[in-house]
Image (cartoon, rainbow, N blue to C red):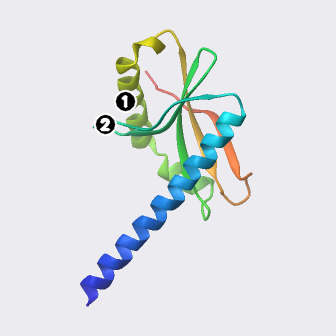
Amino acid sequence: MQLFFHQYYKTRYNINTKVIGNEGENKALEFLLRNGYELLHKNWRTRFGEIDIIVKKDNLIVFVEVKSLPKGNLDYLSKVLNKDKQERIIKTSKRFLLNNRQYSNSYIRYDVIVIDMPGMSEVYHIENAFMELL
């Protein structure tokens, strides 16, 4: 019985977080489109990781990580977007650029969009949230 409860809770929790994540990504995408960005890809995956949203504006390619944090704060955001996560996003973005050479002369930027975090606007856009350190 205890195993059943654990599997039920885990499955139900994962479904709820997936739904919240998808809704957050949709809100973030709507925000970006309203602000003049053009969608290139959503949920672009490689064996290295996933990029939630890839958009273009003029000669700029933006790799966007979306975090839905209805119960979060800035400390929690820094924990979930730690150095390892940033490095995975950067590595994945490099693979995207290798596969899509038409963007090789574009500038790139790494943004974070936070959705529904208490004390912030519903969609909080952090431009240049992180960068690759050499």
Seen at 40% across and 13% down, the residue is 101
Is 95 rendered above or below residue 3? above
Q: Is residue 4 left or right of residue 75?
A: left
Is 130 rendered above or below residue 30? above
Q: Label 1 is placed on what type of residue? A: Lys
Q: Position of residue 89 (x, y in %)?
A: 42, 35
- Kindly indicate the quadrant of the structure image that contains residue 70: bottom right
- Kindly indicate the quadrant of the structure image that contains residue 92: top left
The residue labelled by disc 1 is 91
- Kindly indicate the quadrant of the structure image that contains residue 5: bottom left
Q: Position of residue 108 (x, y in %)?
A: 53, 21
How far apart are the two marked residues, 1 and 2, measured between alpha carbons?
7 Å
* Secondary-structure class at tag 2: loop
The residue labelled by disc 2 is 48
Is disc 1 in contact with disc 2, using a CB cutoff of under 8 Å? yes
Seen at 61% across and 65% down, the residue is 71
